[in-house]
Image (tube, rainbow, N blue to C red):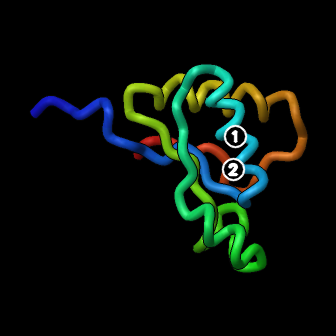
């Protein structure tokens, strides 16, 4: 079976603000990204925590997964404020 490289995969989970930052970073590098559960993060911010049950997730196509994870790792390697969940590696 040939893998579908256009199917979405979650590469990051965090608060709405942090997920939005990561989405902007990826979009700026020509990696189309979208947020999953962003309305939950806006409506119930106390419920949504990095890595929590209602975390906002950043999704990209499988085709862009490696490049997206590399950019996320790079941005957090130069900062000390890394979310508890951070990048989600493909298991």
Give residue 74's position: percent from left, percent from top: 73, 25
Q: Check the picture and name the quadrant holding the N terminus.
A: top left
Does the CB distance between marks 2 and 1 fall below 8 Å? yes
For residue 43, above or below residue 63: below
Give residue 57's position: percent from left, percent from top: 57, 55
Marks 2/1: CA–CA distance: 5 Å
Relative horizontal placement of residue 66, taking residue 75 as reference (left or right): left
| Picture residue at 86% right of the left edge, 28% below the top | 78
Give residue 58's position: percent from left, percent from top: 57, 47
| Picture residue at 59% right of the left edge, 73% below the top | 53
| Picture residue at 79% right of the left edge, 30% below the top | 77
Q: Residue furthest left?
A: 1
Q: Dot 1: within a 10 Å radius of its alpha carbon, few (fewer than 14), some, or many (20 or more) residues?
A: many
Residue of label 2: 19
Total count of labels? 2
Give residue 38's position: percent from left, percent from top: 62, 61
Closest to the observer, 84 or 25: 25
Residue 76 image-quadrant placement: top right
Q: Is residue 88 visible?
A: no
Residue 85 image-quadrant placement: bottom right
Residue at disc 1, secondary structure = helix
For residue 17, above or below residue 40: above
Q: Is residue 86 visible?
A: yes
| Picture residue at 69% right of the left edge, 40% below the top | 22
Residue of label 1: 22
Q: Dot 2: within a 10 Å radius of its alpha carbon, few (fewer than 14), some, or many (20 or more) residues?
A: many
Residue at disc 2, secondary structure = helix
Closest to the observer, 33 or 88: 33
Relative horizontal placement of residue 24, taking residue 87 as reference (left or right): right
For residue 47, above or below residue 50: below
């Amino acid at each position: 079976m040939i893998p579908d490289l256009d199917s979405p995969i979650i590469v990051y989970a965090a608060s709405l603000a942090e997920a939005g930052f990561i989405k902007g970073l990826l979009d700026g590098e020509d990696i189309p990204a979208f947020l999953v559960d962003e309305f939950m993060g806006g409506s119930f911010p106390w419920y949504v925590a990095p890595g929590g049950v209602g975390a906002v997730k950043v999704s990209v196509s499988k085709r862009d997964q490696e490049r997206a994870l590399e950019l996320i790792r790079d941005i957090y390697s130069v900062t000390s404020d890394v979310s508890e969940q951070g990048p989600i590696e493909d298991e």
